[in-house]
Amino acid sequence: MYKFLVVISDFIALVSGLLLLVGCQSPLWSVELGGPALGFGNEIAFSPDGKLLFLGCSRNGTFRCVDPEDGRTIWSVTAHEDDRSAWLLAVTAIAVSEDGRKVVTGTAGARSGKVRVWEASSGTFDGRLDPIGLLSGVVADVAIDEHGDRIAACDENGAIALWRDGGRLLAVTWRAPAAVVQMVFDCTGRLNCVDLQGGVIIINPDGRVERHQLTGELGVAGATINSRGDRAAFGTYDGQLRVYEVESQEVLWGCDFEQGNWPYIGPIRRVAFAGPSQLIVVLRGEERIPVYEDGELLRTHRVGRTGVNAVALSHSRRALCAIFSDTFGRYWLID
């Protein structure tokens, strides 16, 4: 009887393993990056046409452009090589201009975060924006407007800096009460930012600054704002997710990952919009990455491992790229 139970147990374990393998989507390719993502999840960027993919996060400052079809490195550069402490060279933020011609990077720095501009097709250095004394520690995110003539950066201490193309500093326009972790220029020229105290900061083209407090919940662990600047999402340390309409400051929808069929208890540190309404959610310790649209679960990607540090969908929403704590970037095609 005991042997029979052992055989049955082994058979169940085998079937469970096979089901897990079937459910796991194998990446099209993977690339070793030299270190895990050290920023706030903004170390991946697709070009608007989806033909180029930019990856940061290496400990030695390497920033690379790869071909999404096969993961081949098209070019790589040492983005910020004037700091002596290797771990401080990590590329922590990337943004691509709407015409796909320029790429902006931000890094951690010994004295302050650093911002650079590059030619997207070749990796040629195109400009140095040193916010010495303005942005301290880790550059959390960078942004470039649709005309390519304004560049913005924010840091983990809530400072926001804004430049004209060519390197002329316009101003340190705001110091938020918490880390500003994502920013985007919308089609009207407004710079929309989100912070870890549940606020949205809007910097208008005329320099006017507004801040809207959207959530009063304590313990915001992750935050994001969409490309139009009209929706913001916040994840908390206890597994709560809320999506707000910025103008009305009303909750559009939410999830409690401690309930339902997950169940999940832990922080939601990584949330990212893909387009105006699709939202990617990264749950610590989970191999599944859910994607929601207007509160409905659109799909779930089983990536076969935990430890997602950064994730992004392509503009067409037909490809997903993630950087893992094992220092690899992996790429999937979506059916």
Image (tube, rainbow, N blue to C red):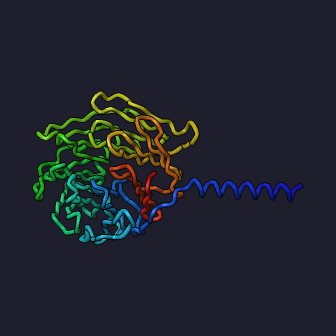
Q: How far from the left and from the top, in percent, is residue 231?
A: 32, 36
Task: State the image quarter where residue 37 is shown.
Answer: bottom left
Q: Image quadrant for the N terminus?
A: bottom right
Residue 81 versus residue 157 in the image, above or below:
below
Look at 31% across and 62% down and name the residue there.
Answer: 91
Q: Is residue 76 visible?
A: yes
Give the tally of numbered discs. Answer: 0
Q: Is residue 244 left or right of residue 201?
A: right
Nearer to the camera, 126 or 220: 126
**Residue extending furthest front?**
335
Task: State the image quarter where residue 281 is shown.
Answer: top left
Nearer to the camera, 174 or 242: 242
Q: Is residue 284 left or right of residue 166?
A: right
Look at 23% across and 59% down and name the residue there.
Answer: 103
**Residue extending furthest right?**
1
Q: Is residue 40 visible?
A: no
Nearer to the camera, 242 or 169: 242
Q: How far from the left and from the top, in percent, is residue 54?
A: 31, 61
Residue 140 versus residue 296 in the image, above or below:
below
Look at 24% across and 42% down and name the residue there.
Answer: 192
Q: How far from the left and from the top, in percent, is residue 65?
A: 30, 66
Task: State the image quarter where residue 322 is shown.
Answer: bottom left
Q: How far from the left and from the top, in percent, is residue 3?
A: 86, 59
